[in-house]
Image (cartoon, rainbow, N blue to C red):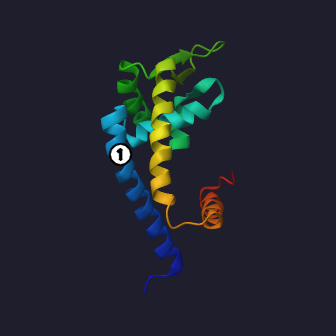
Amino acid sequence: MENTDTRNAFRLLQAADEIRARISGEFSSIHGISVNEFLLMRHLESAPLHRLARVELARRMHVNASTVTRMVAPMEKIGLLERQSHERDARLSFVALTDTGRTRFGEAQATFAKQAGYIFGNGWSKGELENLSDMLGRVTGDPA
């Protein structure tokens, strides 16, 4: 028999997969990006100067640096991201959102918000949504 912790962890994974599936088609067809690319851009959008070192970006995305490198390359080619050198240390480089990338992210963010509204708009009270947000924040270590 499955314990509550196992059941809850499994349900969180299922919920994440369901949300990803709902969003991925629209992201791809409308914005030309994947959900993972959207998440990468979200980390950059919230970073100071809209840029992060590859290693820090990998840490935040819970992947290795080579995965970030593979994700960034095609996004650079289409002008969403760029490499920037550190002002004082040429050995350090950053991945940064371009103006085009910030625009595309804003458009994708609107799509994300619309889909979130569909998912949580019906059948959930404001109190339930606030409680869910608080509980998920405890799981992720992000109280905000």
- Up-down: is 95 above or below 16? above
Q: Residue 74, position in %: x, y?
A: 35, 25
Mark 1: give few (<14), some (14-19) or many (20+) Cα within 10 Å: some
Q: Residue at x 44, y 57 (%)?
A: 16
**Amino acid type of the residue that numbered disc 1 sits on in the rendered structure:** Ser
Relative to 77, 61 lies left or right: right
**Viewer can see residue 114:** yes
Please identify the residue farthest to the right as the structure is shown. 143
- Up-down: is 28 above or below 143? above
Between 115 and 61, the residue placed more toward the observer is 115
Which image quadrant for residue 126? Answer: bottom right
Please identify the residue farthest to the bottom as the structure is shown. 1
Residue carrying label 1: 24
Q: Residue 64, position in %: x, y?
A: 46, 40
Q: Residue 19, position in %: x, y?
A: 42, 55
Q: Residue at x 39, y 51 (%)?
A: 20
Between 15 and 60, the residue placed more toward the observer is 15
Badge count: 1
Between 98 and 96, the residue placed more toward the observer is 98
